[in-house]
Image (spheres, rainbow, N blue to C red):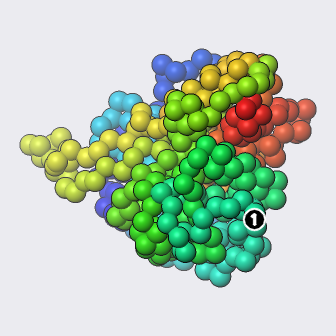
Amino acid sequence: MALDDMRPIQERCSNCSFCKWIPFDKQQSLRFAVACPSIGYYSWNTNSARGRMQMGRALSAGDIGYTEKAVEIIHSCLSCGACDVSCKICRYNMEPLENNMELKADAVSKGHILPVQAEMMESLKAEKTLIRGAKKADRTAWAKGLGIKDLTKEHADVMFFAGCKYSYDEKLQPLAREAAKLLLDAGTDLGFLAEAEMCCSGRAWQMGFFGEFKAHAENNIALIKKAGVKTIVTPCSDCYHAFKRLYAQLGLDVEVLHIVEFVERLINEGKIKFTKSLDIKVTYHDPCHLGRQGEPYVPWSGKEKKIRNQIHTWDPPRPRYNGAYGIYDAPRNILKAIPGVELVEMERIKEYAWCCGAGGGCSETDKKLSEWTASERITEANTTGADVLVTACPWCKSNLSGACGEDGKSIEVADLLELVRKAM
Ligand code: SF4
Ligand code: SF4
């Protein structure tokens, strides 16, 4: 697809603004009814999916050109997909997230990128990671001494993919070690790509750098196929989305599990047992790319057509991604299995969850939007009375932790695996 191909969808946008709010039947208060962080922060229609439809149509029709402001707005989308869920509640033929992404890709293809993005892409090229300042040579430091097999030298059934955030963030590295140890202790035949490992490049896709994403993904797919693994397990929700949805589209055909799914399986098989009670009240933050965007890829090819030159449809019908089949139960089932954990839910959860603020590369490209979005989530978590805000993604943990301490707002932010380890 390209931006021009989105025209029928853009013209079908009814300007109803449903995409700005969580589904009406899920709203419990006006305070936490907004779905889109970009319009929530900027209070400007063009920042919403509705505005992005209008901007996309005007750009592809040549009615407007790229301006500095337009480029800023295009890249101030967290790619969180909340708009997509709300729009599709009562529409079968709209794709707001796809339009947001094609807008970004069009801007990128014409050189309209932010200076920070240029630095991130330079890092991807030189050091195989989007994390600026990180060095490829340091990528495997977190795994030292663990005894995980090197898949470029020997076979293992399961590939562990820590991802860039866990690999390079010193505060998060111990968690990557714990995650791998958990799997090894449960008897998993575990390997990783070691020195050959590179960024999944999912964030490049999220920022609209489709060409760079594809090139890196194809290199990774070749490595994975050569290793002959049966399953990929990752503790990062962005990597999960990349492998499960984007790589599958490029021909990767192996089982992809987020670590919460694998841990739930190990608990059910009796390979992980809990011996301690934690006696805490927790609330759970659904990462966007594990939840609503964690639905598996469904192959499709077809074309758009009109019935009686009036009703738009796709022939054959397109797969409908609306967040319904994301990963919501596994993390909640794990929390319920841990002795002494009481789970209390926030108002915006599952497919209509609020983003942590790190999506779409915005934790680096639009820091104010990113920090505000995280701070809103901390406020929401505080209203539940929970002691701990639990999540299952290093980007969410890092961004949400960073928002604590401002305006007197605070809550302990933990990765679900930390609780699992503590209770064993
Ligand atoms: S994108 Fe969807 S929900 Fe938003 S204004 Fe258009 S039709 Fe309405
Ligand atoms: S993807 Fe998220 S930030 Fe972007 S327009 Fe949709 S709801 Fe707003």
Name the kind of residue labelled 1 in the image.
Lys
Instruction: Provide residue 70's location: percent of width, then percent of height.
Output: 57, 62
Residue 400 spot, x, y in % from top left: 75, 42
269 above or below 209? Answer: above
9 is higher (above) or lower (below) than 342: below
**Residue appearing at x 78%, y 52% in the figure:** 174
Q: From the viewer's perspective, is residue 288 above or below residue 382?
A: below
Q: Say left or right for 112 vs 127.
A: left
**Residue drawn at the location 69% of the way across and 76% of the way down:** 136
Q: Which residue is at 81% across, 46% downward?
A: 402
Question: On the image, numbered disc 1 is attached to which residue?
Answer: 144
- Left or right placement of residue 115 versus residue 205 in this view: right
Give the crowd class for mark 1: few <14, some 14-19, many >=20 residues within 10 Å: few
Quarter that holds the C terminus: top right
Q: Residue furthest front?
A: 187
Q: Quadrant of residue 276?
A: top right
Q: Is 62 or 406 nearer to us in this picture? A: 406
Judge from the rendering whether residue 203 lies leftward or rightward of residue 384; answer left or right.
left
| Residue that protrudes farthest toward the left in the picture | 308
Could you tell me which quadrant the N terminus lies in? bottom left
Secondary element at image label 1 = loop
Quadrant position of residue 397: top right
